Amino acid sequence: MGKLVTEMLKGTLEGIVLAILSIRPAYGYEITARLRDQGFADIAEGTIYALLVRFERRGLVDVTKVPSEKGPPRKVYSLNAHGREYLEEFWRTWSFLAERLEQLRKGGN
Amino acid sequence: MGKLVTEMLKGTLEGIVLAILSIRPAYGYEITARLRDQGFADIAEGTIYALLVRFERRGLVDVTKVPSEKGPPRKVYSLNAHGREYLEEFWRTWSFLAERLEQLRKGGN
DNA sequence: TTCGCTATTCGGCGTTGCTAAGTACTGGTA
DNA sequence: TACCAGTACTTAGCAACGCCGAATAGCGAA
C-alpha cells in the first residue's frame, strides 16, 4: 500500500472527510489525527487542509474560528444542508462502484 | 453521477480493467463495450487505451496483435504473473478502503 | 463514394493527493 | 532568556489519472 491507495483516495477521501464532518463538526488538525487513528497512516496533512478549503469554496460547509489553548485559532468546519445532500450523492456513487467491484471480484459477470 | 464517479475511478478503474483481464484476455474496444454494458456508461474510450498502454509499460500484461474481420488489427492483452500479483494487491487495498467507508457509513466509529 | 462501425493513437486539460517549506501561537526546559 | 516540541494552518510546485476532441485506418453496406 502506498501509491495504490493514494490513487484510490482521489475522489473517496472527499467522501471520507465529509462523512466525518457529518458525525460532528471538526477542524483540520483533528480530522488528520482521527484519520491516522483509523488506519490512514500516510495521509498528508496538507491534503486535508486543501480539501477543507475546497469544501468551503463549494459551499458544503460552514466555518467558525475558535480560539485554541495551545496554538493558533482552529477553523471548525460543520456540514450544512448542501453538504449533506452532496454526501448522500457521494454514497450513491460509492455504492454503485462498490457493487460493480464486488461483482468483479466474484468471478466477474 | 458524473464528476463524482470520474474522480472515484482514479485508481479503481485500473483494478476494474485488471479484473476483467483476469477472467480472460481482451482488447481495448471490447473492454470499453463490456464496461458500458456493466453500467459504466460514461467511461471514455481513450482512457481505456491509455490505461492498457500503462499496463504494458509496467509489465503487467502480455500483448498479441490479432487480425480482425472488420477493422484494424486488435491488440489483445492478457494478464501475466506480475499482473495477477498486482491485482491481488489491488484487492487488498480496495478491501481496506471499502471497510473504512462501510464503517463510516454506519455512524462512524 | 459515402457512411457507419470497428479499432487504436495522440495532445492538451482539469482535478486530485503529495511534498516540502513556512508562519504562528503556546508551554516546558535547559 | 533562549530554544524546542506540539498544535494549527497556509502555500507553491509536482505527478498521476481520467476526460475531451481529433486523427488515422480498415472494412462492409447503401
Image (cartoon, coloured by chain):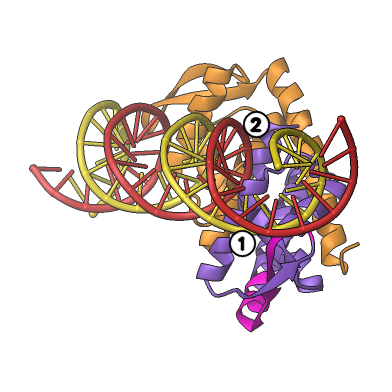
Chain colours: A purple, B orange, C red, D yellow
In the picture, measured across the screen, residue A93 lies left or right of residue C16, that is right
Farthest residue toward the bottom?
A81
Q: Which mark is residue B21?
A: 2
- Element carrying mark 1: helix
In the picture, measured across the screen, residue A89 lies left or right of residue B46, that is right
Amino acid beneath label 1: Leu
Image spot of residue D27 (x, y percent): 31, 31
Residue position for label 1: A52
Q: Is residue B83 visible?
A: yes
Residue plotted at (52% across, 16% down): B64
In which quadrant of the rendered image does the C terminus of chain B lie?
Answer: bottom right
- Judging from the image, mark 2 belongs to the subunit labelled B
- Judging from the image, mark 1 belongs to the subunit labelled A
Residue plotted at (56% across, 69% down): A56
Camera-side residue of D20 and C26: C26
Up-down: is A76 above or below A12?
Answer: below
Callout 1: few (<14), some (14-19), or many (20+) C-alpha neighbours within 10 Å?
A: many
Residue plotted at (70% across, 17% down): B82
